[in-house]
Amino acid sequence: MKIAPLVLMSFCWSWLAVADIGADGHPHEHDDEQHHADETSTHINAYQQRLAAVQTAIVGAQTLVFTDTVFGVIDAPQNAIAEVFVPFRSMVEQVLVEVGDRVKKGQTVAKLQNIVTLQRYDLHAPMSGELTHRRVNVGYRVDEQSLLTIVNLDTVWAELSAFPETIERLASGQLVKVYDLHNHEQAQGAISYIAPTMTDGHIARARAVLDNTDGHWRPGMHIKADIEIAKKTVPLAVNVAAVQRLHGQPVVFIRQGDKFTAQNVQLGASDGNYIEVLSGLLPGSEYVSGNSFLIKADLLKHSADHQH
């Protein structure tokens, strides 16, 4: 029979709460003096802390980064697409490239003969990039038309859609982190353009330029983006995962060796990763930054045990 991970964790934590683990890693009988708990503090030895993967950090200054999340699509820059046109009525004698080939600027891509003058001439790639369309074969008669399309996607545009409440906070130069919708890759750019008009759907367009030398970002790919709209440096902040509620009040657990004490805190702004602490903590204190809910559970259990 399989046991769900959450149930297994709860079982292990409950067992650890009633069994004290010695320095040698073996459980022995519960010692009230060593594992004393009241309404605001509890003792958890080093072995139990490792088993519960308790993470700690130091209270200190932090720069909060505020972002707005928008969605959009990858597009090819307008100057990244080139057409190879034939200048005269001609006969195609050779096509030297295939779709998917990488070409360099100035490379010969086709050979033709002028039907009127019978003069042979070459067509050259107007820029470096990848051939994406080939419209002719040997023997075709052509007349002032595009034979080939070359696209250079070493950089791409992230075309972003913003609602009115977001567009008011956007400005050129703001940093943008772009993610594909599967969160496989991310890239960083900056806002380079904000459209002066809204679409019919009351959406404004903004653009960021992304490096695409690895070819991951393809035109037509749907994306999401976090736009950095503001920063605020605060003297004290903790990880948002550190904050728990105890008796209806926000608390952060301070660690002193094996002792964990719940400190009531007054909180300020948060960027989703860190939250400002206005009062209740001293700089330099070690606090529980990860799995703090396990400390809360242990404290509540022993507080209940002492009431019986």
Image: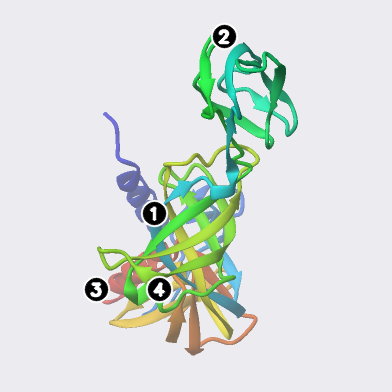
Instruction: Identify the amino acid type marked 3.
Output: His
In the picture, the quarter occupied by the C terminus is: bottom left
Q: Whole-percent x and y of residue 266?
A: 43, 88
Left or right, 18 with reference to 26: left
Q: Whole-percent x and y of residue 177?
A: 53, 58
Spatial CA span between label 1 and label 3: 21 Å
User: Where does label 2 land, which residue?
Assistant: 138
Q: Is residue 149 visible?
A: yes
Identify the element where label 3 is drawn. Answer: loop
User: Where does label 4 land, which residue?
Assistant: 167
* 157 relative to 242, above or below: above
Q: Whole-percent x and y of residue 278?
A: 49, 90
Label 1 or label 3, whichever comes before in sequence order: 1
Residue 303 lies in quadrant: bottom left
Q: Whole-percent x and y of residue 57?
A: 59, 69
Who's the residue at 59% across and 70% down the image? 173
Which residue is at the far bottom? 279
User: Where does label 1 land, which residue?
Assistant: 13
What crowding class fits label 4: few (fewer than 14 Cα within 10 Å), some (14-19), or many (20 or more)? some
What crowding class fits label 3: few (fewer than 14 Cα within 10 Å), some (14-19), or many (20 or more)? few
User: Where does label 3 land, which residue?
Assistant: 308
Spatial CA span between label 4 and label 2: 52 Å
Which residue is at the far top? 139
Identify the element where label 4 is drawn. Answer: helix
| Mark in the foreground, 4 or 2 | 2
| Mark in the foreground, 4 or 3 | 4
What crowding class fits label 1: few (fewer than 14 Cα within 10 Å), some (14-19), or many (20 or more)? some
The residue lying toward the viewer, choosing from 280 and 94, is 94
Instruction: Identify the amino acid type marked 4.
Output: Ile
Spatial CA span between label 4 and label 3: 58 Å
Label 2 or label 1, whichever comes before in sequence order: 1
